[in-house]
Image (tube, rainbow, N blue to C red):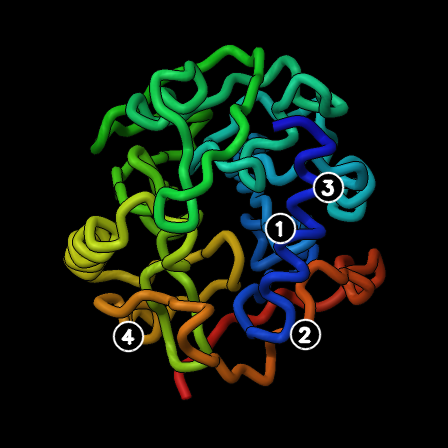
């Protein structure tokens, strides 16, 4: 999906979801000393730093301001050698596309072996209940294909790969250092807690709910504090909040969601500023 497709998606998704309290991204800034976020319209890119090593989780849209916003966080794109991809939708791989600025041309990309079939053309990504086929994403980065349960090590940063199919056939989430769960498009936070992600964008909603059930059991079984960090709706370390409605699906066109924290149009990012990025920590979601 080329840059023009990212721009077209911005326009169409803005019109489709305006006023529905669906997209509630974090702004650019730091969650804590390890996790930083860059906002790209309604999508979030995350960076995890430890021992002088920074890894990247997802690669956002094909977005013109990425270098600028990484500068607000004092992160040099050239320092990124490892990029974990939850799934191949253009708002999660755009900075790797051939007509992007190629800020990460020398980075190795890690993606699930099932998800990789979208990139090879063996499978095509479909949304809106299978009615619409998205353009293919094309990227030339070196890839490492991942299996469910595989554990990686990047200079002392531990990453556990967990397969959660449903939104896409090979969606992965990543548990980093047993404390931070990067969920991509697996969980959607409403004002009253987490749901299975947006219905119209899933390959298989029933499978997504089953995957979320298994993920909850996995994470609760760790018996420790874990921050659940989503691709579009913020973060929390309250597991009761994160999984409050995991058997329910976010249905943006059949249910009205009321959330006073949600912007009217998430694609307007006027409040995402360098001053704010260098200021207070990014607040977590809490149960009401």
Residue 242 position within the rendered picture, expressed as x and y whole percent measured from the top left: 34, 68
Q: Is residue 152 above or below residue 70?
A: above
For the point 67% across and 59% down, the residue is: 14
Q: Can residue 222 be seen from the camera position used here?
A: no
Depth-wise, is mark 4 or mark 2 nearer the camera? Answer: 2
Q: Residues within 10 Å of mark 4 (few under 14, many from 20)?
A: some
Residue 167 position within the rendered picture, expressed as x and y whole percent measured from the top left: 35, 46
Q: Residues within 10 Å of mark 3 (few under 14, many from 20)?
A: some
The residue that mark 1 highlights is 37
Inter-mark Cα distance, 4 to 1: 24 Å
For the point 60% across and 61% down, the residue is: 16
**Is residue 227 left or right of 27 when viewed as pictured?**
left
Inter-mark Cα distance, 4 to 2: 24 Å
Residue 198 position within the rendered picture, expressed as x and y whole percent measured from the top left: 41, 59
The residue that mark 3 highlights is 7
The residue that mark 4 highlights is 244
Inter-mark Cα distance, 3 to 2: 19 Å
């Amino acid at each position: 999906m080329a840059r023009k497709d990212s721009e077209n998606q911005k326009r169409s998704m803005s019109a489709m979801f305006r006023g529905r309290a669906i997209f509630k991204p974090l702004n650019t800034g730091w969650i804590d000393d390890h996790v930083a976020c860059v906002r790209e319209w309604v999508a979030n890119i995350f960076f995890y730093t430890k021992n002088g090593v920074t890894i990247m989780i997802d690669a956002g849209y094909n977005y013109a301001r990425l270098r600028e916003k990484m500068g607000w966080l004092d992160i040099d794109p050239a320092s990124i050698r490892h990029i974990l991809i939850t799934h191949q939708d253009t708002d999660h791989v755009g900075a790797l596309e051939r007509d992007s600025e190629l800020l990460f041309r020398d980075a190795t990309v890690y993606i699930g072996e099932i998800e990789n079939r979208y990139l090879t053309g063996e499978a095509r990504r479909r949304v809106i209940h299978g009615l619409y086929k998205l353009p293919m994403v094309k990227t030339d980065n070196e890839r490492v294909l991942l299996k469910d349960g595989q554990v990686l090590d990047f200079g002392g940063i531990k990453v556990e790969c967990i397969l959660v199919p449903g939104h896409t056939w090979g969606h992965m989430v990543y548990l980093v250092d047993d404390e931070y769960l990067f969920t991509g498009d697996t969980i959607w936070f409403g004002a009253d807690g987490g749901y299975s992600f947006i219905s119209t964008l899933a390959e298989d909603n029933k499978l997504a709910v089953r995957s979320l059930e298994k993920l909850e059991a996995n994470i609760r079984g760790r018996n420790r504090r874990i921050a659940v960090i989503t691709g579009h709706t913020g973060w929390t370390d309250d597991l009761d909040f994160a999984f409050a409605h995991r058997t329910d699906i976010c249905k943006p066109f059949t249910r009205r969601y009321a959330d006073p924290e949600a912007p009217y149009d998430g694609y307007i990012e006027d409040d995402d500023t360098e001053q704010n990025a260098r200021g207070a920590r990014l607040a977590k979601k809490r149960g009401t």
